[in-house]
Image: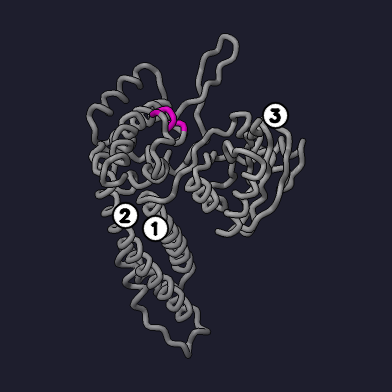
Amino acid sequence: MPAIEVEVTAGVDTHGRTHHAAVIDQNGRLLGDREFLASAAGYRALLAWLRGFGVLGAAGVEGTGTYGAGLARYLTAQGVQVLEVDRPDRKTRRLRGKSDPIDAVSAARAVLAGTAAGIPKSRIGPVEALRVLRVARRGAVKARVAAWNQLHGILTSAPEALRAACADLTRSQLAARCAGYRVLDSRLDEPEQAAKAGLRAIARRIQLLDDEIALADQRISAAVRALAPQTLNVSGVGPQVAAQLLVSAGDNPERLRSEAALAHLCGAAPLPASSGRTDRHRLNRGGDRQANNALHTVVLSRMKSDQRTRDYVARRTKEGLSKKDIMRCLKRAVVREIFRTIISDLNSPLTA
């Protein structure tokens, strides 16, 4: 009689240089664990080792968006079902301890138990490229904010002549004024010359960052117009908002099975908090907070310029709802509308 192949489940705890894999049978019994290099050769060796125990049903991988991204892409390309596994919470780690083998086994058992069912982003298409552009822009924006804070900090304590010369200037005028200061290196022991040197250096940094952000905005806008024209037509949605929502959805829209899944992903799905005779929901503080912030931007825009939204706000206010509760309802409605356009855009022939 032919041997019956055993179906096995894998779990992988990922790190920067190595990945630790574990494999269990259908009863949750540990069959083996081993460490592999986080490289192309290591991925091949890991998969061959896993398949040596039987038919590989699914693999739970921690950190599919960071250290485990390369492994997740490789396993998916080899026909392995990859599921995203959250790291164990603090209570579980206190009870079971913390080590790479323990985390790998926990990931495998989470897949076997069905608690790990999230499909990771594929990260191999135009949405991933858009994400990288947004990462660079976000870093430049943060650096510019820090630079402006430093510039204002120097001006606050600068000699009165400098403070008076920079009073009542717009941001662009202030940056231009400070960037044009002449500095005498032979007199840098004087507070005024040192202040001018500091202001000039920071102002020129701000100007460079302005140019970097403007270029990033052009690139992102062009990418979004080509990738998601229908989403851009939604009221209150601009290029940056559309880009963030696309990045949150990922290149593989099939991971979002319904609009409720997108709402949960964006932290816009209220969570039940009922007890006894009390029937209520509470704010969902989880999910992708950047996506939630994008929805917040859409809602604020509609509350300001969309008459239907303003009528809705007035009606719900009369019913006794607070502004925060009304905005949560509006976020959920925005998700319902955007879900259709995002799925349509990502499934279009131009992006498929």
Q: Secondary structure at mark 1?
A: helix
Which one is nearer the viewer's eye here, 123 or 263?
A: 123
Residue 67 point in image, percent of width and height: 57, 53
| 109 part of magenta stretch | no
- 259 in the magenta segment: yes
At 49% across and 49% down in the image, what residue appears? 73
Location of residue 348 by image quarter = top left
- Given the image, on which type of amino acid does mark 2 rest? Ile
Q: Main secondary structure of the magenta part?
A: helix
Q: Which numbered mark, 1 or 2, is in the foreground of this view?
A: 2
Residue 178 point in image, percent of width and height: 37, 73
Q: Which residue is mark 3?
A: 27
Q: What residue is pinned by disc 2? A: 220
Q: Is residue 226 above or below residue 330?
A: below
State which region is magenta: 258-264
Marks 1 and 2: CB-CB under 8 Å? yes
Residue 204, visible in the rendered structure: yes
